[in-house]
Structures are given as C-alpha cells and as structure tokens.
Image (tube, rainbow, N blue to C red):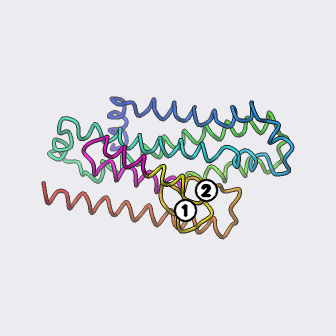
Amino acid sequence: MSIALECKKAKRTGFLPAFVGGGILAAAVPIINMSVRSDMYVGLQESPIQILMNANWQMIAMLNILLIVIGGCLLYSTEFADNAMQKMKSLPIRESNIFMGKFALMVMMCVIVLIFEAAAIAFCSFHWFEIGSEFWMELCKSIGYTMLLMLPCIVTSLFISSACKNMWISLGIGVVCVFTATILPTDHFILSLFPFALPFQIYIDTDTVQTMHYIFAAMIELVAFGLAELIFIKVRRMFE
C-alpha cells in the first residue's frame, strides 16, 4: 500500500523521468567511450568486464549517486509543499511507513538503472571483445554487489531530504557529499565507507575478504541510518 501510494505521488514530480533519463545517460557512458577510444582497451589482457568497469565505472557511479540525491529531494519536496506532511500526520499513516515506501521506490528505480547499465556493458563486451563462459556470472555479481553498496547512499540521501523542508538545502548537502566522495581515495578502506563513496567500489577488482567487509559495512550503515531516521521522526514530533 505504501509503495503504491509513493508511486502515485511520484507521478506528480519529475522523479520517474529523471531516473529513466539518468539511467540511459549513465548506460551511454561505456558505449560512447568505446566508440571513440576503443583502440585503448581492445588490446588489454584483462577480462572484458574488468576493462569496461575500470574504464567507465567512476563516471557511471557518480551519475548514479547524483540520481539518488536528486530522487530523494524530489520525493520529499512534495511532502513539504503546501504543508502536505502536516496533513498526512492527521491520517492513520505512520511517518516511518512513508519513509520506507520512498526507500523501496528508490531501490526499485536503482535496480532499473543498473539493468540499463548492465545491458550497456554487455553490448560493449559483445561488440568489441570476445567474452568467456564466466562473463554473465561476473556481470551479475558486479551489479548485485553495486546494488548492495548503493543502499546506504539511498537511505542517507532520504534521511537528509526528510530533515530539510527546503529542497534546495537537501540538494546542496547531497551535492557536497557527492563531490566529497569523488576526492576520497577508493583504496583506503575507512574513508571509502562514506555512504556516498561506497558505490564507487568495483567488485571485479576487490578480493573476496574485502568484498565481504564492504558488504557487512554497507548493511551496518543501512541499519544505522534507518534507525537514525526513526529517532529523528520521534524527536521532531516532540518539537512540533
């Protein structure tokens, strides 16, 4: 019920077109890159997916994170417009359920975006490289790993958007977080745990032990920010 309600509210904003358009733009990155600079990559010894991810994922990840930030702002802008949030509180609907509905909707849209990007990487692999029997398994693992690492970024972005009634403030904070993440070294484990920096990690370049560390860290951050949102909701009610 909550997800269906959030989908109806999202139709009144540019949320769905933003994610679809952003997903297509991100998926076009490896195709354009290989079209104009294929000579730089075709002769390399690594696997096709490793070459493509190393060459394009930093740009794709940044676009994904920007989409998440913009999506969080759009979803909550309708809640604070014309005191809609105050009106919702008079209904038998929990504010935490609203947050969870938005989180679920954002996850669904991120899955769609990642499918676009996986299709683009598969196309580039077929067109410019010779793929092996393990290609599809590597691709599925890479996309699944990326989705897990995007969850803390999603919940953090929604938390920031829910705390700021002015959409431009939450957008500004999100953009600062994105550019902060771009300057953090991806090979430094502690710094790379910043929620907006986690999606920059690449599964194919990470050993199994470190991969599990990142997954556990992502789950801990997801739970921590989810609990922080529930606490924030209760505290805000006390001062309203």
Q: CA distance from mark 1 to mark 2?
A: 8 Å
Residues drawn in magenta: 148-176
Nearer to me, 190 or 223 = 190
Q: Decide: is 175 above or below 15.
A: below
Front residue of 188/112: it is 188
Q: Which mark is residue 192?
A: 1
Q: Is residue 235 left or right of residue 186?
A: left
Can you say which quadrant of the picture contains the C terminus? bottom left
Marks 1,2: beta carbons within 8 A: yes
221 lies left or right of 124: left
Can residue 115 be seen here? The reply is yes
Residue 20 drawn at (x, y percent) = 51, 32
Residue topped by disc 2: 201
At x 25%, y 51%, the residue is: 95
Q: At 31% across and 45% down in the image, what residue appears?
A: 169
Q: Reading the chain from its start, which is encountered first: label 1 or label 2?
A: 1
**How dense is the environment of label 2, judged by Cα within 10 Å: few (below 14), some, or many (20 and up)?**
many
Q: Amino acid at mark 1?
A: Ser
Residue type, label 2: Gln
